[in-house]
Image: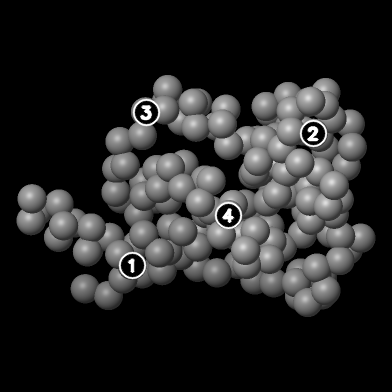
């Protein structure tokens, strides 16, 4: 049976220009953290990999469920994970337009976890990460099912 992949979104000319230049001034998506606005641009490879590594438990749960695989991540485990990873995730987002931003400076500022989560979600959308991870899980789903039955 062929595996059906998640449909890729259509890119506008502005999306193409932003992807080509990654200029924060061209971004049409902005996150506000602690009263300051940060344009959301495409993450470079190393930052994207760090972002994904920090989000791994959440992405495994969400994308796995989209692909029909239950990761068994509890709500309590999700909240604990978010408390730990939101500041460094938000710092990755903000550093794309302000290299001085750190996870520590975010925590010390006047912000809320919901502002940080909002910035992370906007970055996920900008890089189309959830859809890409879901497509990956759809492709490897049959292999994961084989591993479970082999136990």
Q: Residues within 10 Å of mark 2 (few under 14, many from 20)?
A: few
Indicate which label's residue lies in the foreground, 3 or 2: 2
The location of residue 119, given as percent across then percent down, is 71, 42
Label 1: element kind? helix
Residue 50, disc: 4
Per the image, the residue denoted by label 1 is 139
Q: Which of disc 3 and disc 1 is earlier in sequence?
A: 3
Indicate which label's residue lies in the foreground, 1 or 4: 4
Q: Which of disc 1 and disc 2 is earlier in sequence?
A: 2
Label 4: element kind? helix
Gap in angstroms between the C-alphas marked 3 and 4: 23 Å
User: In this orientation, does residue 32 appear?
Assistant: yes
Q: Residues within 10 Å of mark 4 (few under 14, many from 20)?
A: some
Q: Which of disc 2 and disc 3 is earlier in sequence?
A: 3
Q: Is residue 79 left or right of residue 32?
A: left
Indicate which label's residue lies in the foreground, 3 or 4: 4
């Amino acid at each position: 049976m062929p595996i059906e992949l998640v449909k890729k979104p259509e890119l506008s000319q502005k999306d193409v220009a932003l992807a080509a230049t990654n200029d924060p001034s061209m971004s049409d998506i902005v996150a506000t953290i602690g009263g300051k606005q940060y344009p959301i641009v495409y993450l470079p490879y190393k930052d994207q990999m760090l972002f994904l590594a920090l989000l791994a438990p959440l992405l495994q749960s969400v994308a796995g469920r989209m692909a029909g695989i239950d990761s068994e991540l509890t709500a309590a485990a999700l909240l604990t994970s978010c408390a730990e990873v939101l500041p460094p995730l938000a710092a990755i987002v903000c550093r794309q337009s302000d290299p001085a931003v750190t996870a520590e400076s975010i925590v010390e500022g006047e912000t809320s976890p919901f502002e940080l989560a909002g910035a992370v979600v906007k970055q996920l959308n900008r890089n189309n990460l959830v859809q890409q991870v879901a497509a990956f899980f759809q492709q490897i789903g049959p292999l994961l099912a084989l591993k479970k039955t082999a136990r």
